[in-house]
Image: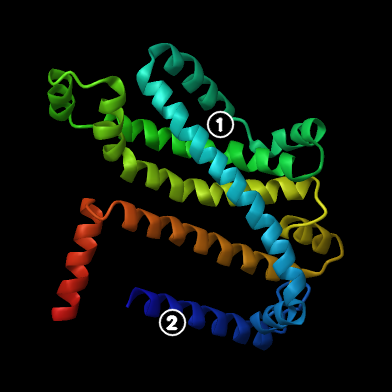
Amino acid sequence: MRTLRVTIILAALFIGWEALVRLLGVPAHMLPPPSAVLAELLDQPQWYLMHTMSTLLTTLIGFGLALLVGVLAAIGIISSKWVENTLYTLLVSLNSIPKIALAPLFIIWLGTGLESKVAVSFLIAVFAIVIDAVLGLRSADPDALDLLRTLRGSRFQILFKVRFPNALPHIFSGMKVAVSLALVGAIAGEFVASQEGLGYVIVNAQSMFQTVRVFASIVLLGVTGTILFYLVDLAERLICPWHVSHRVEEARALSAQHG
């Protein structure tokens, strides 16, 4: 039902956009109609697919590194006061710096290849995962922690039997934000220096006032970001079906079917 509503809203939006552009006679170089954007995508599908896959690869590597490093950093932060006072403060300071300002440095250090774009993607995405993972690891049930300590459970057992399962919903919340940020980081890296990817397409098209191509790239970015978000959401549903948010949604869906 939700998918149907979203489809209807999007269809109405694009139809209204098409009608207004044609009725008002807006020049195509200012605001192309959706039909022109669709025609552009259908005219060069393999070329757009190649650049989309390049951006997607950068995003997935940056996101994967952010997830790995972010969770490990969160474990270190909740395990050691010294790590919290140093690493956490460093992450907060780095997060306050606009990442696009760091992109030229990564180009100097790592070159114009995949590595520099992955570095930007990783740096933008990692903070969201650290914040949510720390929150989840710290919000474990104190009674469950005390019980495991009473039973002489090791720090490893406490982490993986109590803290980590409790933190999973929080980590997935951070992942949903981080996967979108990783895509933003990939595009930012491609803006600065790249020979492929949707960011490169946008910069190149903008310099030649090819507005239709810019819009086509933006549409592909929107589709890619949406797919990545819902893949993370699907993973959460499969791994954490016990979480209260999913039980509430299932109850509402059953109620709507019987209603």
Mark 2: few, some, or many residues within 10 Å (few <14, many ≥20)?
A: few
Q: At 71% across and 57% down in the image, what residue appears? A: 54
Check disc 2 and report its element: helix, strand or loop.
Answer: helix
Classify residue 36 by image quadrant: bottom right
Task: Please tell me which residue is depicted at 79% across the width and 44% down the height of the picture.
Answer: 113
Q: Could you tell me if residue 259 is visible in this image?
A: no
Label 2 vs 1, first from the N-terminus: 2
The span from disc 2 to disc 1 (Cα, nearest Å) is 38 Å
Residue type at numbered disc 2 = Ile
Task: Characterize the local packing of mark 1: few (<14), some (14-19) or many (20 or more) Cα atoms within 10 angstroms.
Answer: some
- Percent x, y of residue 71: 44, 34
Residue at 67%, 84% in the rendered image:
35
- Horizontal and vertical percent position of residue 94: 58, 27
Q: Position of residue 108 (x, y in %)?
A: 82, 32
Q: Residue shown at 39%/60% (left/top)?
A: 234
The N terminus - image quarter: bottom left
Q: Does 249 sit left or right of 122 as displayed?
A: left
Residue 255: image x %, image y %? 15, 73
**Can you tell which quarter of the image residue 250 is in?**
bottom left
- Three-letter code, disc 1: Asn
Which numbered disc covers residue 205? none
Q: Secondary structure at mark 1?
A: helix
* 20 or 130: nearer the viewer: 130
Q: Which residue is mark 1?
A: 95
Label of residue 8 in the image: 2
| Residue 100 in sight | yes
Position of residue 169 relative to residue 91, above or below, is: below
